[in-house]
Image: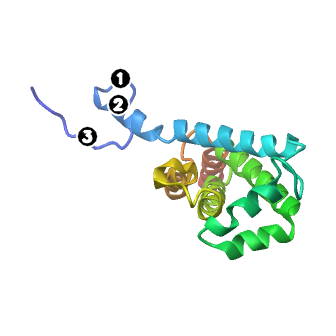
Amino acid sequence: MTHRMRTDTYGTPHSGEGDWRETATRYALVPLRIFLGVTFIYAGLDKLTDGAFMKDSGSGSIGDMMRAVRDSSAIPALVDLSLKSPVGFGYAIAFGELAVGIGTLLGLLARLAALGGALISLSLWLTVSWASDPYYYGNDLAYLMAWIPLVLAGAPVLSVDAALRARRQRAGSHH
C-alpha cells in the first residue's frame, strides 16, 4: 500500500479518500452557522412579535424579567442600565439577534455577526442565566461557546463573504 504525498491544497475531484475529509473539514462550521443563524432570527422575531414581552411590566415582560434576575446577576449594574428603558433594551436585543442571525446565516460580515452573537450571549449569561445552578443549565454560556469558532473562522464557504472575496480576487487579477 503506497501513499502519494499531497502537494495540492484542495485536491482534484475523485483523487482519493482524503477528499471527503478535506471537504468535511471545509464545511464543518456550516451546520453551526445554520443552527445559530436560524435560532437567533427566531429569537429576535419571537421577541418582536410577542406583545407581552415588549413592555415595562406585566406577565412575561422584559421589565419584569430583568427585575427578577437583577439580584442574582453577575453585574447588577448592567441590569440597572437595561431597566432605565426595558423596552428599548428589549428592542436592542431583538434587533441585535435578528441582525446577528441574518449575518450568520448568509455569511455576511460573518465574524462581526458572530462577535455580536457572542456579546449578546455573554450579556444574557451574565444577567439572565448567571444564577443557573449547576452552571450548564444556563444555555447562554453554551451559545457563547458556540459563537467562538465562528468569530475565529468567519464563514469561508457558502457565504456572501466568500463570494465577495472571490470577486475581489478576480477583479485584482485583471490589472
Left or right of 5 on screen, residue 161? right
Q: Are marks 2 and 1 in contact (CB under 8 Å)?
A: yes
| Residue 62 point in image, percent of width and height | 80, 55
* In the image, residue 153 above or below residue 52: below
The x, y position of residue 174, in whole percent, is 63, 52
Query: Which residue corresponds to the image point at 64% horizontal and 49% vertical from the top-left?
Result: 161
Q: Which residue is mark 2?
A: 19
Q: CA distance from mark 2 to mark 3?
A: 11 Å
Q: Residue 3 at what x, y percent from top left?
A: 15, 33
Of the two numbered discs 2 and 3 in the rendering, the one whose residue sits closer to the viewer: 2
**Looking at this view, is 8 or 105 the one in front?**
105
**Mark number displayed over residue 97:** none
Precedes in sequence: disc 2 or disc 3 = 3
In the rendered structure, find residue 6 and report the number of the disc placed on it: 3
Label 2 to label 1: alpha-carbon separation: 7 Å
* Amino acid type of the residue that numbered disc 3 sits on in the rendered structure: Arg
Please name the residue that numbered disc 1 is placed on.
14
Q: Earlier in the sequence, mark 2 or mark 1?
A: 1
Residue at x 45%, y 40% (from the top left corner): 26
